[in-house]
Structure formats: C-alpha cells, structure tokens
Amino acid sequence: MSRSGFGIIGAPVLFIGVFQLLEMMLSPALPLIQRELAASPTEIAWIFTGGLISSAISTPIVGRLADTYDKRALLLTLMAVTGAGALVSALAPNALVLICGQAVQGVWLGVLPLTVGLFRDTLAPEQGATGNGLVIGVGALASALGLVLAGPLTSALGYRWLFLLTLAGALVAALWAWRTVPATPRAASGSVDWAGGLLLGGGLALLMLGLTTSASWGWAAPATVALLAAAVLTLGLWAAVELRSGDPLVDLRLLAGRSPAGVTAMGFVFGFSSFGLAVALPMMLSLPVETGYGLGADTLRIGLYMFPLGVAGTLVAPLVGPMTRLLGRRAVLVLGSGLVPAGTAMLAFWHASPWQIVAGVTVVGLGVSIGLTSALNVVAADVPADRAAGVSGVVFVAKSVGGTFGAQLGGMVLASGAVAGVPAESGFLKTYLLSALLGLLAVGAALVIPAAARHTRDGHPDPGPTAKAAAPRG
C-alpha cells in the first residue's frame, strides 16, 4: 500500500477505534460515574440513550453530506465536533452536562459511512476493500479491548481520563487526517434535504427512545405505545416526503434495489440477532460457578472472554478482498452471514468451559467481520458514487436499530425463565438458539444481493431497474 493510501485509511480508522473503545469502556465505568456525580438511575440511562439517539439521527445526514460535499472538510469537522463532546464529558460537573457531552459526541458514528465514500473516491478498489475491512476489524478489536481496559484504567486514573485519553487519540487522528487525506470534489449536483432530515431524525429519536425506555416502562405502557406510534407516523410521513422529493436525503427507490436492500437487511439482522452475545453471554459468565452454568467472571475476565471477538475480526477483515476474488462475493457474503448464527448456536450447546466460550465468540467475530466488510464492499461497488456514503449510513443505522430491538428481546427471554432474578440455564439456551435462528435471516439477505456488480457501458455502477424508473427523464 502506498504511503498516501496508508494515511487515508489510517486516520479515520484510528478515530473510529478510539471512540469505539470509549463506548465500550463507558459501561463498566457507570457505577463510578453515578457515585461521583450523584446521578440518578434515569440520568445514568440517558448517558447512553442520548448518545444512541444522536448517532441514529446524525449518521444518515452525515452520509448525505459526504455524498454532496468535500469529504476531507467534513471528516475534520466531525473530528472537531466529537472531540469537543469528549472534552465536555471529561469536564462535566454534573450528570446533565455529561449527557449533553455524550449527545454531541454521538455524531462520531457518522464517520463510518463517510469513510466508505472517502475510500471509494481516493483509493483503488483493492485498497478501498482493505480499508473497509480495517474499519470493521479495528472497531471489533476496540470493542473487545474496551471491556478489558475499562476496569484497570478507571481504577488507576478515574473515569474522566477515559474521555481525556479519547480526546488525545482524536487529536492525533485529526492531525493525521489534515496531513494525509486529500480533498474530494463536490458532487456536480445535489443538496441536503433538511426537511427529510428533520423528519427522519425525529422518527428515529422517537423510535430509539421508545425502545430504550420500554425495559423500565413496559411494552404495554401508554408512554411506550405513544412513542412507538409517533415514531411510525413520523417515519411514514418522512417516507412519503422522500418519495416526492427530487433530491431526497435517502433515495428509497435506490434503497429498494437488490444490493442496497440486501446489505441494509444484513446490517439490521446482524444488530438484531446479536443479543445472544451482547446480552446473554456477559450475564451468564458473571453468574456464580455454583449455578452449574456460570463461570463467576468479573468485569476483567468477561472482557478477556470477549477479546477473541475483536482479534478474529481484526485479523480476517483485511482478507475479505482476496477471499472475494477467490470465492466470489456472494459466497463470502453467505459465509460471513452463516458464521454468526453458527457461533451463537455453539454457545447454546457448549458453554461449560472457557475454551468453548472462546471458540463460539471467535466464530461470531469472524462472521460479523466478514459479513459487514463484504457488505460495505458491495455498497462501494454497486451504488452510484453520489449515494455510496448515504447508503452506508442507512446500513449502520439499521444495525443500531436492530441491536436496540434485539437487546429488549434478549432481556425479555432471559427474564421469562428467571428464578429470584437469576436466569435459568434453559433461558440462556433459548436466547442463544433464538439469536442463531434469527441470524439465519442474514443468509437470506445475502442471497438477494447479485453475485457480481452490474455496471453500465461507461463503467459506472448500474443502480438497477427500480432506481432507473425513479430517475428524471430528459
């Protein structure tokens, strides 16, 4: 890889890695934050919810901005905004200021779709595929490292240093990007549909708020029903507006094409079916050995058990490009999609010893990394250049929404068989198997995607008949 290619990939990958690391370290640090800031349980919950809603709202808007404006300027702007959010969080004198800082910081997720467009515009296809792989792999590694490092760092330095160290990493990434990332040309035409952005942002905010508060309020609570109903109405209105717009924020007709629809469905299913690993496994690992199925692990040991998830993902992600050339992209998509439920099913039947846990986690890590990397490569190859970042943003939002749905479902399944608040082994078995069964839907989504990219005679991606039908006629 050329020196310039290394810099173009390295700067955003470093930035994504440090903020993904912070996101994972924050959860174990919440008890310490609650004590030091005298925060209520509701305020603590909003530290996560605020950032989650901010990410969901900003990601599709950033994706469209990246399709329209100079990606270098947008990348540096996002780095500055998220760095400011980290600084506010580090210096927050109370929980309310910390929540505001986290909401500002939440826009960091928009860098993910931006990088897909940046790599496509500035790198050769092989280098772009490697870059997409590193984005997914380093994100997975940072997630695993966060669980391992959270305890020692907060014990030695205090929770504020989590934000300060993240800020230092973001500054390094910003300086690197300023020196190595080239400017990209603006789109010949197009603008940001701010009305559509307002409706989409409002609908996603209502949806994420309804999902995250349903655990405490209950699914049948009037407030939960009202939030979810308002979300459906707002998103329905947004869809109607987008279909009538000549330059929509998210081109729904393009999104209905086989490749965009397939990768979006894969993202949602990966997020939705992850509850077996994200919700059930840490809980089972923490239960006392006397239960017969718990391993009595503390936070550090849980992080070590989960660490292979990130290592496997980091190692395999850069190999997705060569694998695709060797096996074909559909085979790689199906392989990644199939490994995720296979690893989760392994945990259902083999979880009595540490090596069994590590084996299952490793298989899931391989599957997620292969699946998401190949999905991003499909977007880069099949979607028109002025929509690639926007479609990638939709994929990441779908994964986030799916993960929120899945977390609530996993909690409900575990709670249904709990005795004195402790889930029974059968509850974990059902959770893993349900997670694996739902994960198989990603294989179906992968099979929808064309086996090879289609291009027009001039070499540009063919958007497909659905998008063609929506194109204005001259």
Image (cartoon, grey):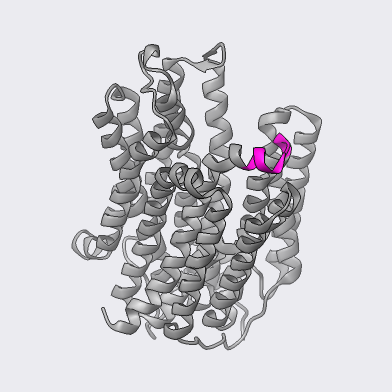
Residue found at the far front of this picture: 156
Task: Choose between 231 and 134: the one closer to the eye.
Answer: 134
Question: In the displayed structure, would residue 63 be above or below residue 215?
Answer: below
At horizontal 78% and vertical 45% (from top left) the residue drawn is: 230
Q: Is residue 473 visible?
A: yes
Task: Choose between 395 and 369: the one closer to the eye.
Answer: 369
* Residue 325 among magenta residues: no
Question: In the displayed structure, would residue 232 be above or below residue 177?
Answer: above
At horizontal 27% and vertical 24% (from top left) the residue drawn is: 353
At horizontal 80% and vertical 35% (from top left) the residue drawn is: 223
**Picture coordinates of residue 365 (x, y %)?**
33, 46
Task: Choose between 125 and 244: the one closer to the eye.
Answer: 125
Q: Which residues are magenta?
A: 33-42
Question: In the displayed structure, would residue 360 be above or below residue 220?
Answer: below
At horizontal 67% and vertical 41% (from top left) the residue drawn is: 44
Quarter assignment of residue 325: bottom left
* Residue 34 among magenta residues: yes
Left or right of 371, for residue 220: right
Left or right of 25, for residue 47: right
**Picture coordinates of residue 366 (x, y %)?**
30, 48
